[in-house]
Image (cartoon, rainbow, N blue to C red):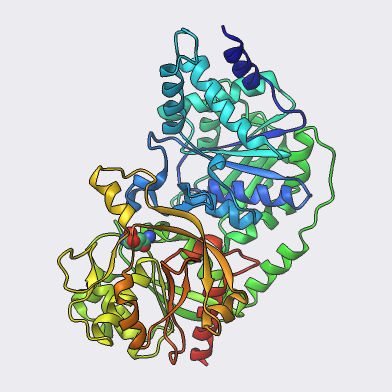
Amino acid sequence: MTAKSKTTRAKVQKLKKQTKFIFVSGGVISGIGKGITSASIGAILQSRGLKIAPVKVDMYLNQDAGTIRPQEHGEVFVTDDGMETDQDLGHYERFIDRPLNKINYVTTGQIYGEVLRKERAFEYDGEDVEAIPHVTDEIIRRFMLAAKNADIVLVELGGTVGEYQNAIFFEATRIMKLKHPDDILHIHVAYLPVPSYLGEMKSKPVQQSVRMLNSMGIEPDIIVGRAETIIDDKRKERIALFCNVDKKAVFSNPDVKSIYEIPVILEEQNAGDIILEKLKMKPRKRDMKEWRSFVKKIKAVKKDLNIAVVGKYFGTGKFELADSYVSVIESLKHAAWANKHGIKLTWIDSLKVENEGAKKILVGFDGIVVPGGFGKRGTEGMIQTVEYARKNKIPYLGLCYGMQMATIEFARNVAKLKNANTTEVDDETKHPVIHIMPDQEKKLLVRDYGASMRLGSWDCVLRKGSQAESLYKQRRIAERHRHRYEVNNKYRAVLEKAGLVFSGTSPDGKLAEIIELPGHPFFMGSQFHPEYKSRPLRPHPLFFGFMKAVAKGKK
Ligand code: GLN
């Protein structure tokens, strides 16, 4: 072994003093809210003044979520540093109110990619490169990276226990626990069904899934039981006995109206103190006042505002739509609550608008949102949606593709640029008011698709006196992007002359980032995705302004 490789291995073995690791696994079925449970645990630990570094592990071979179909993957959450990640990172950011980055997102593809790179670079010094220890070492190295400046690293292991493809990650956690028994905690989140014909909550599936963990040499320290209702004492006792955990370390996580209630529900069961105790950490005082009063406020909201989200990623029903636009939905909720209202969201496939007409489909909504999207399908429906909102003075918010569609609608119907379009949809249009960014075109020609869009946080300068400026209350902002196309500067002057205001641009003025229409109750579009930066206690200015206008129109 050369000196270099010795130190690499040594680093992998040595755990930074004081840093603790929590691993969260899931059992019985997927989609039970493991991400929200992890985010909530992060929030209650952070409320004790601890610095939490959440990490999501996705078990696919993709390097990131950027190349996966929205219907398949759900939302792609973009970080400030431009990583295309999983929607759970969005939950972590919203619950612990801290921007994350690429360190916080690990995929099997990244792990194997790095091991293969190292092998080619002779960094293993002629060793026979194997799953164990080389892949597990690389996994542990990645977890360690997140430990920098953190008191606790909170790793959510994607998928459910028992899946072939995640075994190597569980193995890495087993090795860590073996070496540092006092610093590692395993929390298993599993589902307890209540079959309607029995009317009784069943704990057997949880026991089975813990067996599966046991067979990999892992004993969970804490069990979070997800179920429709509260888990009663009798069942907590049974789970404790059969799963070999402390009874007080079995927590109930029932269905709730708002996900933001979960930290409060877990704290009512003393989750934070028990986690610290099991991690051999000193008890710490918590401060959850602000969060509690926020949860109270949500429960006290006045009547619902009716919002239509006209998008394209429906897949097999409304559930997938919700998944594709999680951050948009949460941002709308934050803003509605801050305006003291509830919200009723209706998902509308833009193809439906295209086929049946905007008037029929969109009548009665208090506000309309067109979120991000790619490709041709459904775009005419989006353009008709914009026209309907503009002409009927219904508050409109366009996010990325929704901003581009608004620009096209305005070009066609107000600036009279016949058949104006984006070259993404029609590359022969006479009026390409939206066109591909020059560097993007080069990338597509050589099939450079991975992480190659304009991604991550970019500065934007707001026009003095614009609505954007009055909402942000500042002139320079930074927002997160994910796109390949942009407003064609050749058309800016004619659009502006017809009344469209470009109220936000890149600092050099070259890229149009925000459009708005004066004289309308609210008509705005952003090339960036403001939904990535909205927080429950700090709604995003654009969403806030939109919802304020919606509430005003409702009166
Ligand atoms: N398809 C558009 C583009 O690439 C919009 C992308 C988006 O909505 N995220 O520019």
Residue 435 in picture, x, y percent from top left: 28, 65
Q: Is residue 355 left or right of residue 59?
A: left
Residue visible at 62% across and 77% down in the picture: 473
* Front in this rendered view, residue 510 or 332: 510
Against 37, residue 282 (above or below) is: above
Residue 193 in picture, x, y percent from top left: 49, 46
* Front in this rendered view, residue 52 or 456: 456
* Numbered circles on residues, count: 0
Res. 342 image quadrant: bottom right
Is residue 142 visible to us here? yes
Residue 413 in picture, x, y percent from top left: 25, 86
Residue visible at 70% across and 25% down in the picture: 15
Is residue 351 visible to us here? no
Q: Is residue 380 left or right of residue 509?
A: left
Against 218, residue 268 (above or below) is: below
Residue visible at 71% across and 23% down in the picture: 181
Res. 9 image quadrant: top right
* Front in this rendered view, residue 326 or 125: 125
For ligand 1, the image quadrant comes to: bottom left
Residue 421 in picture, x, y percent from top left: 23, 72
* Front in this rendered view, residue 13 or 412: 412
Query: In the image as oriented, which residue stretches furthest toward the front?
Result: 508
Task: Tell me the quadrant of the picture where the N terminus can be found.
Answer: top right
